[in-house]
Amino acid sequence: MKYQRVLAAALAVIMALALTACGGEQPVEEEPAAGVAVQVKTVTAGSIATENKVSGQISADNESVILIASPAKCTAVYKNAGDLVEAGDVLCTLDLGSTLSSYNAARISYQAAVQSYQDQKAILDKQVALASDNVANTKALFEIGAASQLEVDQAELNYQNAVAGRNSALSQLEAGMQNAKSGVEQLDTALENVDPNGNVLAPQSGTLVTMNATEGSYISNSMPLIVIDGAEQMKVTASVSEALVPKISAGDSADVTVSAAGQKFTAVVRSVERAANMQTKLYNVVLTVPADVTGLLSGMFADVTFHTDVAEQTIVVPTEAIRTSNGVQYVYVVEEDTAKYIEVTTGLVGSGVTEVTTGLTEGQQLVVVGQAYLADGDPVRVVGQEG
């Protein structure tokens, strides 16, 4: 056994000498570079705006919608959806006999109410004037001793009663007149774009995009009967909340994306409603689509992004560079190949970027990749830098 161990040792020595003689070298492991690999970005000042994304809908800029508020039977259809029409073309015919009779009766009632108001007002105004003259005459007689104070007081009371009576009577007459006017206006709406023969006329030239009537059917007053798109110019209508509407004004810009048409463009705010929709409690904002944007069709949905609360010349960093722990926001910067922990305060948030109001200054090297693996004081290796 001792002989075998000596022999094995000798063989090992011989093999080692042979490798050395043949020029063989033992591999040398390289030491890994020290520090956590990170990418940095130089902190600079810039501008940022809060982004508010809402839904919108595309429609023709001069779209005409015909809604018949009174139920009626369609007796004939002359144009179909997709047809080009001219202003004044007959689109369909409706049996509106009873509605037309009601309209004529409502107009007569309204005219009678107006005439009654005017006649009664003239009579009552004359009575008030006579009562006023009586007060003046009674006071004049009182001054010369020909009338008593009681007679003066009675004359003034009669005048006050005349004024109160006139105001009360005119209020009632005016209420009746307004009711009659409302009835006429409702029927005016129901018969807008309809001639005395029940023909529905095109209010403008364009493309007939909707025709919700067929011969022999009854039309519904819950949806538009006809929709006509005019020129190719389009608009976007978006609905915004009460918190956002005060921050939007005519002339502002907004980013619009219409996925169905594969279009992204900047639109300009044309108008902002100051009264909320009764059902949705939202405010409509209308934006003009640039003339060079094509491929949009009425009814397409759009994503509209409004930029508000703009801050200029402020520190803006990638949002991903900011970390949060126990409610505290912080970042890492690189100083002399060492990670430095800095607590920050943030402000506005934009698309992938955030405003830093305290904690950072221009020129610092902010860690934007690798910050999740850092602790304050760790050695780092910068392997990439953004502009």
Image (cartoon, grey):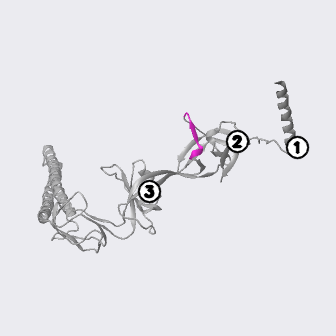
With respect to residue 164, does 190 lie above or below?
A: below
Q: Disc 2 vs disc 3: Cβ atoms closer than 8 Å?
A: no
Label 2, on which residue? 380
Q: Is residue 213 visible in the rendered structure shown here?
A: yes
Dot 2: what SS? strand
Q: Residue at x 24, y 63 (%)?
A: 212
Residue 385 lies, in percent from the top left, at: 67, 51
Dot 3: what SS? loop
Asked if residue 325 lies in the magenta stretch, the reply is yes
Residue 74 lies, in percent from the top left, at: 17, 66
Which label is found at residue 21?
A: 1
Q: What span is colored magenta in the figure?
A: 319-326
Kindly identify the amino acid type of the residue bearing the numbered disc 2: Val
Distance between mark 2 and mark 3 Cα atoms: 48 Å
Label 3, on which residue? 249
Give 86 or 196, whichever is nearer the viewer. 86
